[in-house]
Image: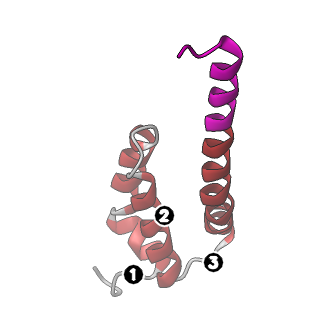
Amino acid sequence: MTISAKDADADRMSDLGVEGMVFAVCGFPLMIPFGMGVLLPARPWAWTMGMVLICLGLTSVCTIPACIPLLIFWLRPETKAFFGKLAPGR
């Protein structure tokens, strides 16, 4: 049994549709916290949320080059002090 080029193209388009749906289902809910991250006030819980979002970014090979410098900056004492994560005088 041979598969025609038309059938192969239909299968490929079907696969692309499934992949597109998976990316949409995962991407749209994550768009909300990442968008909120820019607008959050300087509070200790906002620092924690930022850390969680950076760690989510570390799960993808494509975003690791951006997340590693961001993580280094995020863990600095000055950044923690800005968000109120450090006790005064530290």
Mark carried by residue 68: none
> What percent of the width, then of the height, locates residue 11?
63, 29
**Looking at the rendered structure, which numbered label has been put on residue 41?**
3
As drawn, 83 above or below 73: below
| Callout 2: SS | helix
Circle number at residue 85 = 1
Q: Amino acid type of disc 1?
A: Lys
**Given the image, on which type of amino acid does mark 3 rest?**
Pro
Seen at 39% across and 40% down, the residue is: 61
In the foreground, 41 or 24: 24
Image quadrant in which you'd find residue 25 = bottom right
- Residue at 67 percent of width and 69 percent of height: 36
Part of the protein shown in magenta: 1-16
Disc 2 marks a residue whose amino acid type is Leu
Residue situated in front as seen by the camera: 18 or 25: 18
The residue drawn where x is 28% and y is 79% is 90
Q: CA distance from mark 3 to mark 2?
A: 16 Å
User: Residue 12 or 78: which is nearer the viewer?
Assistant: 12
Q: Which mark is residue 53?
A: 2
